[in-house]
Amino acid sequence: MSAIQSLAALLKAVAPLSPTMTVSDVADQFLQPAYKAFLSLPIVDAQQRPLGLISRYRLQDIFMRRFGRDLWGKHSATEAVNPDSLVIALNTSLDEAARIVTAQLQYPITEDFILVDEAGCYQGLGTVLDLLKAMEGRIDQRNRALNRALRELKNSQTHLIQSEKMASLGQMVAGVAHELNTPLGYVKNNVQLLRDLVQPLLALAEAQAQLSECLTNPDTPTETVEARFSRVQDATALASPGTFEEDFTPLMEDTLYGLEQIGELAVSLKDFARLDRAMSEDIDLNDCIRSALVIARNTLKDKAQVITRLGQLPTLTCTPSQINQVLLNMLTNAAQAIQGNGQILIKSWADAQHAYLSIQDNGQGIPKAVQQRIFDPFFTTKAVGEGTGLGLAISYKIIQEHGGNIRFASEPGRGTRFVISLPLNQNQPQQRSA
Ligand SMILES: Nc1ncnc2c1ncn2[C@@H]1O[C@H](COP(=O)(O)OP(=O)(O)OP(=O)(O)O)[C@@H](O)[C@H]1O
Ligand SMILES: [Mg+2]
């Protein structure tokens, strides 16, 4: 027990009165400067056991009566004692002492309390005022500790949110890298084939250049002209426009398609990761869905067939990178809930006040017993290293900060449907997470 926790810290070494004193003697004691600060004085017996406290208030009461001093002055002090005074053991903790004192406190406060050692012998006085002050100090101390803990908690929450963001960023980058690889692979192949295809064309161009050079020179011997002419004919046969066109056109088209896919991924990635954290106006939620689907394509492709039914939506004000983070988590959750091959249905629609989007999977569903907890930070049913349990907690916070709402319905064994609503009219200033 630390000193500040112990009642001993509040002990006032007040010399006790003896039972042989008279009431007048006690009244005189109260006038002594040493006792000025006390509401009451203790009386102890020969074994130092407290008999009780005589309060200043009680004496005043007696002496204010008519002939009070004459009638009472010579009486034994024990007659003015309150035998039910508060007696508290010195080793009691401050909290416990405060509990005992406040439980018996009467107004006005007219008495202090007696402190005794383990054997029950008088050790000194404690005053209610000191006790209250000490408690106030402790409350301050606790508040400070609580504030510190709150700050630390906030810090670690920020770190966790950051690491969850990094994790979803990592997941996204891995997915996109994978997606980029396929078109990159065949674009590279096609370009190599095209290079081979172009070789005879280059040879023909070169033969034609040599022929035209000797044709423009009247001194060229006829044999040379003929030899060059025949080279041109050979080169023309190798670069026949028919074969060329047959191979060239589909290769070119494939290559262009691959490049378009790469371009589409690059745009989605840029939209998705938009680092400007500011709220943007005029965001079409359907665009967010499309870009999240491109990013999640790698996660989803072996898991689920994705069906989208996107309705016409008015534009709204939001932070697209945050909405994308929510969508990516919802899509990942849906894919992770599906064992084998399933289906994910994504819909969007709007009414006069809100835009809605729903993500529905036919995965394993959420057991009734945990449905209340899925938005709790760190709640996860996934294996260690697979889920941190922060995805939905962060998603909930993001949607809430956008003035919206997330609801869900789940049927274990049949699937889950999350519905996000976002207000169309966002006149109120929005908060954003750091
Ligand atoms: N579509 C869903 N189907 C079934 N269970 C779900 C679905 N979405 C969420 N859950 C349940 O809610 C829990 C919490 O989801 P949340 O996204 O917060 O964390 P996580 O996916 O476990 O981990 P993290 O998102 O951090 O990788 C999941 O572990 C899972 O049990
Ligand atoms: Mg998740």
Image (tube, rainbow, N blue to C red):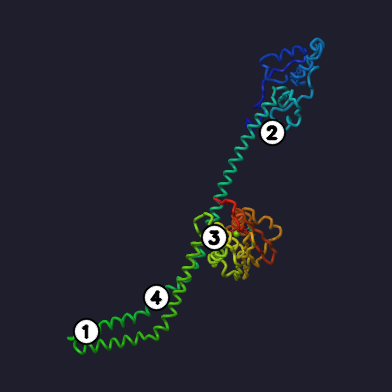
Q: How far apart are the two marked residues, 4 and 2, measured between alpha carbons?
A: 83 Å
**Looking at the image, which residue sits at the far left?**
219
Task: Where is residue 317? Give x, y as percent.
Answer: 56, 57
For label 2, the residue is 95
Please tell me which residue is depicted at 64% across the width and 59% down the height of the picture.
Answer: 353
Task: Where is residue 125? Give x, y as percent.
Answer: 70, 23
Mark 1 / mark 3, whichever is N-terminal? 1
**Residue 250 sits above or below residue 408 on the image:** below
Find out whether the residues at labels 4 and 1 contact each other: C-beta distance under 8 Å: no
Task: Where is residue 355? Give x, y as percent.
Answer: 62, 61
Q: Amino acid at mark 4?
A: Gln
Task: Where is residue 10? Give x, y as percent.
Answer: 66, 26
Of badges 4 and 2, nearer the viewer stands: 4
In the figure, is residue 222 to the left or right of 129? left
Q: How far apart are the two marked residues, 4 and 1, measured between alpha carbons?
A: 36 Å
Q: How far apart are the two marked residues, 4 and 3, measured between alpha carbons?
A: 44 Å
Q: Is mark 2 within 8 Å of ligand 1?
A: no
Point out which mark residue 142 bears. Answer: none
Find out whether the residues at labels 4 and 3 contact each other: C-beta distance under 8 Å: no
Mark 4 / mark 2, whichever is N-terminal? 2
Mark 4 / mark 3, whichever is N-terminal? 4
For label 4, the residue is 192
Point out which mark residue 216 bears. Answer: 1
Towards the viewer: 25 or 248: 248
For label 3, the residue is 282
Q: How far apart are the two marked residues, 1 and 2, measured between alpha carbons?
A: 114 Å
Q: Secondary structure at mark 3?
A: strand
Q: How far apart are the two marked residues, 1 and 3, measured between alpha carbons?
A: 66 Å
Q: Amino acid at mark 1?
A: Thr
In the figure, is residue 306 to the left or right of 32? left
Mark 3 / mark 2, whichever is N-terminal? 2
